Image (cartoon, rainbow, N blue to C red):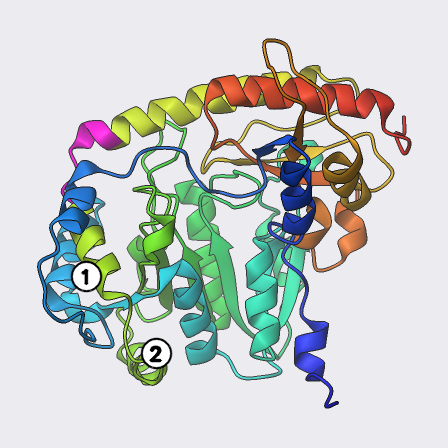
Amino acid sequence: MPTISNRGGALPASPIRKLAPFADAAKARGVKVYHLNIGQPDIATPEAGLDVLRSVDRTILEYSPSDGLLPVREKFVEYYARCGVGVAADEIIVTAGGSEAINFALQSCLDAGDEVIMTEPGYANYISFAQQVGVKVVSVPTSIDNGFALPPVAEFEKYITPRTRALLICNPNNPTGYLYSRAEMEQIGEIARRHDLWLISDEVYREFCYSDEPYFSAMELSGLEQNVVMVDSVSKRYSECGIRIGMLVTHNKEVRAAAMKIAQARLSPPLLGQLVAAASVDAPESYIDAIYDEYISRRDLLIAGLNAIPGVVSPTPRGAFYTMARLPVDDADRFCEWMLSSFSCVPLGGSVPSTVMMAPGSGFYTEPERGRQEVRIAYVLNKGDIAAALEVLARALEVYPGRVG
């Protein structure tokens, strides 16, 4: 039998999904699983988008242009203008989710052997995507003890080598919930300017910024118009993860030309997803406002509940809908698997045995040992479920054989 590629064998398993077989087995035993592992909101998709889906009247579900339907790109030009970002329709390439946009950006801007710098912990799939194209991720450590604050510029510059080609940021941040201020964005921009680097900016959570300061996009950085490549998606904004629609946005013609070659090779982004996404852009402002308020209340409930559990530490996120929490356990990977395979209880007011699924923190680090006591938690469930999940987690930590501290 032939062997698989070295590349395939070396790729890391997703910390977000790798425990799914254990969750499936728990459900088969009759255990309710509270999914705090994945950023799948339980918020309803905008009716405008659902109405389009219900009323599709086409005799052929055809290919779209490789960069997406023009009316869809024009609709997003309107959306970005409302966000203070001026782009033209031909500066947008529609992708199969933000994930494909990140892949396009890495392949268009970096060669095998080049280095990309990001903060750590960072989105796990960045590490996987970079490995797939032979790019080395160089991580600048941040710490849960100061809320994962951005390190000083001088600290960033310690990690720049002759092979460094790009900075990759996620703002607001997944997995930490950290939100870069305008001043911090300008510091990052200055690094990119001084060292002539690409700045790949993942901004899919821009609607979820829990700060009085206006959101500042990398696309607004003066003098970096040709360096910035923005990644975007409708998945979380409109609770449309399943339609797989994202965007790569840049003023740089050479990047767009390179990305279009890749886009043409994969043919086209999802047709029906584009129709739904374009209609959702017209969702009333009240839709986003209600979601915003809901996530703040979920965040406050979760963070207060986590920090009330003896030995647990979790800073307050200022954006997105994730938090990293440090647990009093010997190994969070083992603990998360144990929760699904060996523990359940009936929470107060509940009627069935329940457990919690979380994403082990090790998968969000290039050096997994740094995240062995951490987990990423997504506060995407309603407050009743979050309260129940917190109770289950607290009771699990009381009896876990590998508890420390």
9 is higher (above) or lower (below) than 28: below
**Label drawn at residue 48:** none
User: Residue 240: percent from the left, percent from the top?
Assistant: 33, 47
Q: Is tag 2's residue or tag 1's residue first in the polypeptide sequence?
A: 1
Secondary structure found at label 1: loop
250 is higher (above) or lower (below) than 315: below
**Label drawn at residue 259:** 2
Q: Which residue appears at 73% of the width and 18% of the height?
A: 309
Residue flagged by tag 1: what amino acid is it? Val
Q: Residue lying farthest bottom?
A: 2
Say left or right for 155 vs 338: left
User: Residue 90: percent from the left, percent from the top?
Assistant: 17, 71
Secondary structure found at label 2: helix
User: Residue 126: percent from the left, percent from the top?
Assistant: 55, 62
247 is higher (above) or lower (below) than 114: above
Q: Are marks 2 and 1 in contact (CB under 8 Å)?
A: no
Residue flagged by tag 2: what amino acid is it? Ala
Say left or right for 317 vs 70: right
263 is higher (above) or lower (below) than 125: below
Say left or right for 184 vs 119: left
Tell me the distance, in whole angstroms, between the alpha carbons under discs 2 and 1.
17 Å
* The C terminus, quarter of image: top right
> Which callout, 2 or 1, points to the residue nearer the camera?
2
Residue indicated by mark 1: 87
Residue 4 visible from this viewpoint: yes
* The N terminus, quarter of image: bottom right
Q: What is the magenta range?
A: 281-287
